[in-house]
Image (cartoon, rainbow, N blue to C red):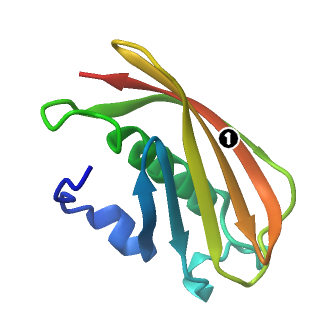
Amino acid sequence: MNKTEPAHPFADLLGMQVDAKDDGQCTCSISFSESLLNPNNVVHGGVIYSLADNSMGGALTSILPEEERCATIEIKITYLRPAGHSDLIGHSQVIKRGKRVAILESEIHSGGKLIAKASGSFAIF
């Protein structure tokens, strides 16, 4: 679907880009910046979570009709290793779309390594 993307100031703040979005899948990326680091000199977990959340939303909106919207109900994320000082790439896909709830999965990579996996449910209205 070729919907016009609404403004997303928070994603803009993080420098997030939508790289691909179609058929229940979405890939987003964030270029590495030192402003994303926490006091331990690794990318803050909230940045990684936000990438998963936004790429899941993108995957779901790619299959929704123009008049439907979605919102995150919950996301469970497992951090597998710290992100390196390299770009982050998040790929998400719709696992099941019901009438009012969809289930999605996401993988986040940094420096070619899997750093986090997430699963989430989204409301459809």
Pointer 1: what residue? 118
Q: Quadrant of residue 17?
A: bottom left
Q: Quadrant of residue 9?
A: bottom left
Residue 80 seen anywhere in this rendered image of the structure:
yes
Question: What quarter of the picture does the C terminus occupy?
Answer: top left
Q: Nearer the viewer, residue 95 or 107?
A: 95
Q: Quadrant of residue 18?
A: bottom left
Q: With 69 as the anchor, is 103 left or right in this view?
A: right
User: In the structure shown, which secondary structural element does the residue marked by tag 1 occupy?
Assistant: strand
Image x and y of residue 81, in percent? 87, 60
Position above or below: 107 against 98? below
Residue at point 44%, 71% (across, down): 16
Position above or below: 65 against 102? below
Q: With 82 as the anchor, is 123 left or right in this view?
A: left
Image x and y of residue 70, in percent? 31, 32
Image x and y of residue 27, in percent? 52, 60
Position above or below: 24 against 12? above
Q: Nearer the viewer, residue 99 or 13?
A: 99
Disc 1 residue type (three-letter): Ala
Q: Nearer the viewer, residue 23 or 71?
A: 23
Image x and y of residue 85, in percent? 74, 84
